[in-house]
Amino acid sequence: MPPDAIERRLLQSIVEVARHMFGAAASSIFLLDPESGELVFEAVSGKGEQELVGTRFPPGTGIAGWVAASGQPMVADDLSGTTQFAHDAAASTGYVPATIMAAPLFRFEECVGVLEVLDRTASRSELDDMELLGLFATQAACGLEFLLRERQSRGLEPPDDPYVLLQRIGARLATTRPAEATAVRLLAIADELLAR
Amino acid sequence: MTITPPWRREERTHFPGVPAWSLATTRQAPELFEVSPLGEVGRDWALGGADGTGVRVCVVDTGVEGGHPRVGGLDASYVVTDSLTVSACEPVDPAGHGTACAGVIRSVAPGVSLSSVRVLTDGKSGTGDALMAGLRWAIDEGFDLVNLSLSTTRSHFREALHELADRAYFRRCLLVAAAHNMPVLSFPWTFSSVVSVASHDEPDSMRYYYNPAPPAEFYARGVKVPVAWPGGREIRSTGNSFAAPHITGICALILSKHPWLTPFQLKTVLFLAADNTGEAHAP
């Protein structure tokens, strides 16, 4: 199966499971564009419009924006009739919900996306729902980790110019991946190369 | 003329080896300072009849919509800029979260003075440098209480944040921080120099419990909380983010009645006035 198809299948599987866990009307997933901070709408299950997949939203706006910026999950109820949520929801799925539940997706120490569940019906209690969504978001983020690694490694053959290579390494070290993990990975690659 | 209290004085410069922190009390009396004595502390002693008047609270978050009826006006509104300086800004909130927190504080402590520093302006970098800059500014500005319904998961900031939290503690600026809602390690709510808050699920804004199993030290209302939302609206929200401002409001009530309490005294009063710590609860 080509990598793109695996990506789509993983993302779709996350929103399908999230929707069914909570008997929800819809579930959707956003990933953060690391350059612009924009939220990119990646997949939807249930009520909503598949055509909106790929749409970008400005950073820091609405519930998904706050969840992405703060790294905290949140449940918001009684939204119907508020135009801001109508707008948020229309922008995200084309469906206007009465409740939204959203949790961050973490990669290492950084939030890389947001998982939303709209209009859940299979609810035990607010605190239980939030805990379950948080646990599932943690699991989903592990799957996404592999997907994002695959994305980032594509088309990254070493450049001819060593200066460009150094710049790229510098930029990567400045990100929030723990230095220790980077060092271990480097040693593993060195080991692999020497073993050839 | 207002006299600068000892805890707000400029720091002295020190040389290693000089016993600069000691006081020869055999020949020099300890300096006089304002004291709020602890009596028979209970809920009524702590906050009975108080409304938060005279207490300055800063909401470090996504900004606050100052004109929202539930917010009841802001004294000042600031934003951390791209160059990490703090400047005055319009009282707006593009995300809604800070407005919700400010409204909760106002509902508990109607007389309080509310200000806002927007640190979550950029979905990409909001939880790091801007948070540090905004929090440092709020502590140096001399706010009595800072509501932090956010945290960072980035260990890179841990040490600097720890220093800031300690600095706040010694300057009589109490940080009230929301516990994370997920099983991840984040800061500063896990530090002992702050008051950390998670949720209980009862619909009572004044009910709060001491949690003897830290790091979340108190439980306050955090489920289906009616909160302000931008555009003059109201929604119901769940999360520790909305529990923390209840404790911030309760701290404001206590401080308005007992203005000279230190952060450690205030935490003690919070403990003594909680719904599960009175004499009736003794084993």
Image (tube, rainbow, N blue to C red):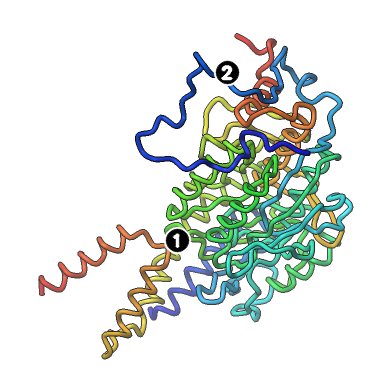
Quarter of the picture holding the C terminus of chain B: top right
Q: Nearer the viewer, residue A155 or B172?
A: B172
The picture places residue B209, in percent across and down from the top left corner, at: 66, 27
- The secondary element bearing badge 2 is classed as loop
| Place of residue B227 in the rendered image (x, y in percent of width and height, measured from the top left) | 79, 49
Res. B145 visible in picture = yes
Looking at the picture, how far across and down is residue A172, in whole percent?
Answer: 37, 72
* Residue A47 versus residue B156 in the image, above or below: below
Image quadrant assignment for residue A185 = bottom left
Residue at left 53%, top 69%?
A12
Query: Eyeballing the image, is B46 above or below A58?
Result: above
Residue sitting at x 78%, y 44%:
B104
| Number of other residues with Cα within 10 Å of mark 2, as a class: few under 14, some 14 to 19, many 20 or more | few
User: How many angstroms separate mark 2 from mark 1 (CA)?
Assistant: 56 Å
Q: Tag 2, which chain?
A: B
Q: Residue furthest left?
A: A195
- Name which quarter of the figure residue B90 lies in: bottom right
Disc 2 target residue: B29
2 and 1 marks on the same chain: no
Return the residue found at the far top.
Answer: B283
Tell me the subunit letter for badge 1.
A
Q: Secondary structure at mark 1?
A: strand
Image position, residue B112 (x, y; %): 81, 41
User: Image height check: is A49 above or below B113?
Assistant: below
Q: For the N terminus of chain B, which image quadrant?
A: top right
Is residue B197 visible to us here?
no
Q: Which residue is situated farthest in the bottom direction here?
A: A160
Q: Which residue is mark 1?
A: A107
